[in-house]
Image (cartoon, helix red, strand yellow):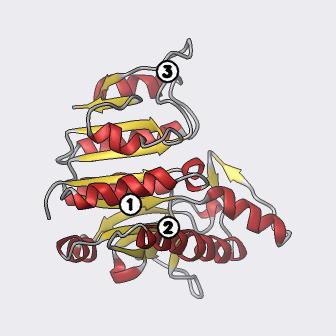
Amino acid sequence: MGKVIVVKLGGATLGNHDTTLEDIVSLQQQGWSVVVVHGGGKMITEWLEQRGIATKFIDGERVTDEATLEVVVSVLAGVVNKEIVADINALGGLVVGISGVDGAFIQGRVKQKELGYIGEVIKVNPAPLQALLKSGYVPVVAPVSYNAGEKEPGMRGVLNINADVVAGEIAATIGAEKLIFLTDVVGICDQRGRLVPQLSTKEAEALMASGTASGGMIPKVKACLRALSGAASACIIIDGRQPHALLKEIEGKGGGTVIKK
């Protein structure tokens, strides 16, 4: 499969991702095996508002009842996933869009009952990804999973899982060389707001414990630590709004924050 990297596309890059997708095609042509994981929270919220469905968060997790789950699956596995796939196709890339439900690729269970259909990963079955990568395709992964946990009667078989978590679990399972987050911030900053260019795993854990790394940065840092528990040599959190940020990072010219073992 060649060198494997996992790229997580954040919501900010989904609205302005022309150079990111160009970079993905370039990496594929250079012989890299690339796995893309995307989010879509902003569009999910917009769709819910259009349908008069209130959005509620608990500890940063979107409470997902049945009505919300239908929107989540429609947006993530439908609109967002297929738009990314279509754009990569148009740039000449070889790409297939899948969700965690396909091939029971990502298996989850309900995280907390009060969160509804929010899941946590219990297993990643790498076979579908490996088949696509060996055939030369870029898998574009929508972060919904197969509900492999204990289900109450009538419960749906699909779960909504944080895309950062999914990216970390995939990277750890397939032995990715790098996990790269394209975000709408410059990286991890210290208490004075200054970019921290490099962290060890222990330093990253300390930043979370102190509250310096907070909010949406926490699942990213945890995902990095999960990936580094496998074969990954480095995880990088960079500003995906910058032109060709991904390609520059692979070429060693990127910025952001690097977390290493």
Q: Residue at x 26, y 45 (%)?
A: 178
Q: Residue at coordinates 41% horizontally, 29% vertically from top-left?
A: 256
Crowd band around label 2 with a 10 angstrom C-alpha radius: few (<14), some (14–19), many (20+): many
Say if 252 sits above or below 250 in the image. Answer: above
Residue hosting label 3: 210
Q: CA distance from mark 2 to mark 3?
A: 37 Å
Mark 3: amino acid: Ser
What amino acid type is highlighted by mark number 2? Ile
Q: Residue 137, position in %: x, y?
A: 28, 72
* Quadrant in the rendering for residue 6: bottom left
What is the tally of numbered marks visible in this picture? 3
Disc 2 from disc 1: Cα separation:
10 Å
**Residue at label 2?**
84
Q: Nearer the viewer, mark 2 or mark 3?
A: 2
Q: Residues within 10 Å of mark 1 (few under 14, many from 20)?
A: many
* Left or right side of 108 for 2: left
